[in-house]
Amino acid sequence: MTSDPICEGVLVGDARAVARAISLVEDGREAGVDLVRRVFNRTGRAYLVGITGPPGAGKSTLVDHLTIEARREDRHVGVIAVDPTSPFTGGAVLGDRVRMGRHASDQEVFIRSMATRGHLGGVARATADAAVILDASGKDLIFIETVGVGQDEVEIARTADVTVVVLVPGTGDEVQALKAGIMEIADIFVVNKADRDGAERLVQSISANLSLQAFGPEGWRPPIVKTVATTGEGLPELWAAIGDFRSRAATGETRRRTRHEHHLRELLGQELLRRLEGMLAPGAFDRTVERVARHEVDPYSAASQLIDEYVGRVPRRDTEPSSRGPAGRP
Ligand SMILES: Nc1nc2c(ncn2[C@@H]2O[C@H](COP(=O)(O)OP(=O)(O)OP(=O)(O)O)[C@@H](O)[C@H]2O)c(=O)[nH]1
Ligand SMILES: [Mg+2]
């Protein structure tokens, strides 16, 4: 199919090739995109488990235990630990290596940390592409660990088949999570460090928030699993909850479709922007920015004008008779 050694290496599951391939997609440049293109038709088997939560919540320790569970079932595991806040491979990453160290000699476990702030196309894209590489290399269960409960995490969660949100008692995490919209993306909640005071209170608080939400057509109500990651307590229950969610075929299919739809929209947006930028007359974009900055034109009209001028007049949704109002019409 190809004579590219990295690509071939990935497809036969060679760990060094996989590591290099992930570096390429992390860079977000053409070589990485090319690789994703080439291996994509060999993917689609892996199940993506997103694990997100605030710093130090115990995500890596949980992933470590889940990896043990997965290996017992002879699953081939990939782990991507993303730290969107740090452009460097810092202490947390080193910590992950140590905590996941027991899998170091296991050929069927591949662990990779990505510190991806500032990468082209964003951390969510890099993560999704890294997952494609792992999938192509034969990993059938991929954990994506992300630190934080912000917008990046919501984006990354969109790339997962199931999203596990980890919170810790006595930290006010749930308030933060609620604000960031994390409550809505969680398929499973984990109250980790349940050996601490306040675990039951946190369960109640999450539960109260959940009862305010409408559940999807599948009627999945996110379970709340209490764990002590350091001892492994509650881990079989968490593993079972993930399996339970996965076994709901309808949920899985809808999720995958939504995921691909979202990804495609993102790419279309990026690609159209890139092409439009290529079409603009020299300085046209900067001049428009300045006009907006001087408040001579509002940004909505400015964007429309650029598109009308360079792409052509196309009927916009908001100008259709059934929608909003006269506002915004040309
Ligand atoms: N008491 C207690 N400590 C825990 C528990 N789970 C994890 N820890 C400890 O909490 C610390 C952080 O654990 P990690 O697994 O690195 O947490 P993390 O969420 O991956 O951390 P970052 O990746 O840095 O955000 C470690 O010192 C763990 O040993 C738990 O259930 N109870
Ligand atoms: Mg970690």
Image: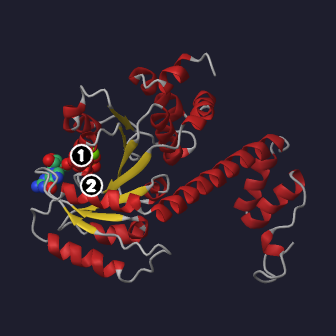
Which residue type carries mark 1?
Glu
Above or below, 273 against 201 in this view is above
Q: For mark 1, what is the residue?
A: 69
- Residue at image mark 2: 239
- Asked whether, in this view, residue 139 is left or right of residue 227, the answer is right
Whether residue 296 is visible: no
Residue under the image location 52 percent in, 43 percent down: 44
Counting from the top left corner in percent of width and height, residue 45 is at: 48, 43
Judging from the image, the colouring scheme is secondary structure
Quadrant position of ligand 2: top left
- The image position of residue 14, as x and y in percent, is 42, 22
Along the line of sight, which residue is nearer the eye, 142 or 275? 142
Distance from the alpha carbon under mark 2 to that under mark 1: 7 Å
| Image: 270 above or below 12 | below
SS for tag 1?
helix
Q: How crowded is mark 2: few (under 14 residues within 10 Å), some or many (20 or more)?
A: some
Name the kind of residue labelled 2 in the image: Trp
329, above or below 166, in the image: below
Badge 1 density bin: few <14, some 14–19, many ≥20, Cα 10 Å: some
Image quadrant of residue 93? top left
First in residue order: circle 2 vs circle 1: 1
Query: Marks 1 and 2: in contact by CB < 8 Å?
Result: yes
Residue 323 in percent (x, y) is at 77, 80
What's the mark number on residue 255?
none
Which residue is pictured at 34% across the width and 55% down the height? 52
Q: Which residue is drawn at 51% across and 41% down?
A: 126
What residue do we see at 53% from left, 39% from top?
A: 43
Whether residue 233 is visible to the viewer of this picture, yes or no, is yes
* Residue 321: percent from left, percent from top: 84, 81
